[in-house]
Amino acid sequence: MKSIYANALRGVSLLALMAPLVPMSALAQTAPAAEEAPVASLTEIIVTARRRDESIQDVPAVVNAVTADTVQKLNIREFTEVQTLVPGLTLSSNANGTGGNAQVRGVNFDINASGNNPTVEFYLNDAPITAGVVLQQMYDVGQIEVLRGPQGTLRGRASPSGSITVTTKKPDLYRYGGNASLTGSDIGTTNLNAAVNIPLIEGIAAIRVAGLFDENEANRVRSLGNKLEPRSKTQSSRFSALVTPAEWLRLEGMYQRIDRDLRNFNQVESFNVVNATAPASPTLIRADDQRSFQTNPRIITQKYNIYNWRAEISISGQQLIYQGQNYTQAIRSDESQDPANLFPTTNTYQYTASNIESTSHEIRLQNQERVLDMFDYAIGYFDNKNLTPTTLNRPTVVRLPLAFGGGVAQVVQTKIGRGGSSREKAFFGNLTAHFGDNTHVSGGLRHIDYSDVGELLVGGVLTARDTHADKKWIYTASVQHSLSRDVMIYANTGSSYRPGISAVGNFSLAQSAREKSFLNLPSETSKSYEAGLKTTLLDGRARFNVSGYHQKFANYPYRAPNGVYYVNTVSNGAGGTAQQVAEFNFVAAVPVTVYGVEGEVALEVTPQWNVGLVASYSHGRIKNGTVPCNDLNSDGKPDSVTSAPSLTQLQAAVGANNVGSCELSQNSSFQAPFSATVQSEYRLPISDKLEGYARGLYNYSAESKGDPTSQFDDVDAYGLLNIFAGIRDADGKWDLSFYGKNVLDENKVLTRGNPLSTTYQQLPGAIIGGVPTITGRPSAVTTTSTYTGITTTTPREFGVNLRVAFGSR
């Protein structure tokens, strides 16, 4: 607890100290300047957080905007790098390629646990979209906005922690133009993206075509026993069209295709590196080695097709907007089910095919001109359908008796199908009243009608069917008051709802009641309260914002960070079943309380030099929640397990429940509670047509505590430094830059799981009368390796980027 409060105090103190220093440092820099010297000012950022264009400083909530200029300047190629600019935000793609997740404000989301409704919603051109589509290589992006806090009365779907909106660049109706960017690095990266804009009929119709080719070394982890190189290859194209046949009518359309092929190996570390009592590995592997001991790589192919369309009709100061989208994703993941690498020459792949389709429609009416000089409003209807069919096979190795050499007798394949569909319909409305120029009060309501159905077929037999049907109201309300032209205070509150989830990954043929309770959860609700201050100082040269929030969840879907052992019933290949030890990250509905502080300081020191700091502290806590756990001694407390138990040990501890449970209080999120980002840029005019520059980006993450049942997965504080330097044409026609990412080569283990283990069916046998004889039925055996799976910070990278542009960019 001491470290938690220390981090909170550090965050608040840092922001508090920076506030008075902003004007002092600025005055110190500018006092001697001549009166005719140019005056610097921060660029005003326009956002659409409330579904209309407005300054980010006028929004009564925390919004972090990443502009197209920032993406270009910091050579952000993959969307997960956005987290380097937004403290408190964690973005990650699932290892199996089925999707991704975002984490902010002290709670997590895992698509394998949480179904279709994430903690943080993603939007592409104003329509909801799965994280897996967004967390890819980026190109031709207009702006990214990270909105923190409950969302749902103004756009798309309800989400308790926030929304991330991505806008692609729109066609220019008047000017031809285009750009191209080429990046190469010392770690095998080749990234080429380009766009061209063509006005077909000036002022009426235009198209924009953009494309991307990216090839890199994926996670750069190489296998000890396989010479195949890790690689990732992405190709994408986007076609956008804009037509304005009349002043009152605007039509937009976009099609995008993404194809990605990935081959990588799971990174491991010898367990005795962190646990001195663990047995030594055959080959010592440390985190710095970027190695895997597994022979068979993971192979993933992803194909996405996105259709996005929009129509706007503007009449008499009112605007009717229709936004639609359809996307499909075809994902194939081939992954070995032999984590301990016991059978390196045997095909133990699980082949997973996921073919998901989603369609959304939203129609809303809002004002363009203020009603009665006092009111802004938006009302609308939203409809979203999802189809989520997934098929896979679950291989079970049957091993010959050791007396026969211990080879593989057969691999039993169990076919598994997961079918599902969901539909969400909602009416929403939001009204803002302006009492003069200084005081604004806003409120919104949303009525949600949600239903879904999921079916699990194992071996062609329906083994589980779960349904949800809810009708819920959520709300938001805010009040803001401008103490002066440059100082605004605000307070807001909001509620949120997410439908109950069904965790995917446990395909046991005989699930217990307790097991099912840790797989199918009731609906989640939350309430949030926030207050903040936004200021613009020194005639626009400085900005200081700070906010604090508190949020309380009921039935939050907590997912175990490390696997929990359970008794798994599988087919034995002879028409019967067998039990074995398996591992799965079960879920549980628990109460969670979160509180935190977020802040920002930005300063234009001179017209050539700017500095910015963004910091976040968040602490989420589960209190007296019943969760799945490894409790082999049956004392009601989670055990620290360093190897898989035998089937007999596990059965003695869990009985007919198949899985253990514990009541405990612990963190709801395992990301660093405090994080901060510092950016700075200095520009040096070389001539009337040339400009040099240097930029820096530093990310700090405080220490974080992982799974309380593991003493080996905590993460110490660390920092990552990126630097950029280059020269460019003053008019932006070309830009040549050199960069280094993680230049200090900070290699930090971010996650560390249990030692990797493989479970198989062992046939008993002996040599009887000189004849090999099977003496009974197979039994489950679990072998634990001397390695543990890890993830680490991104490796150091040095590279060069050349960008050229002409006309409309």
Image: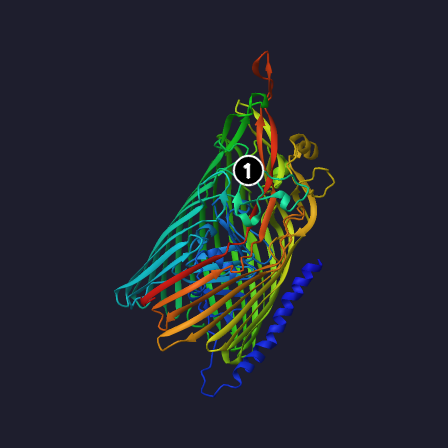
> Which residue corresponds to mark 1?
339
Quarter of the image for the C terminus: give it. Answer: bottom left
Quarter of the image for the N terminus: give it. Answer: bottom right
452 lies left or right of 368: right
Residue nearest the observer in this picture, 40 or 339: 339
Residue nearest the observer in this picture, 456 or 92: 92
Residue positioned most to the left: 201
408 lies left or right of 137: right
Name which residue lies at 61% across and 77% down. 20
Residue 617 figure quarter: bottom right
Observer able to see residue 229: yes
Tag 1 secondary structure: loop
* Residue 587 image offset from top left, x and y in percent: 60, 44
Observer able to see residue 50: no
The answer to whether residue 617 is above or below residue 18 is: above
Q: Amino acid at mark 1?
A: Pro
722 lies left or right of 280: left
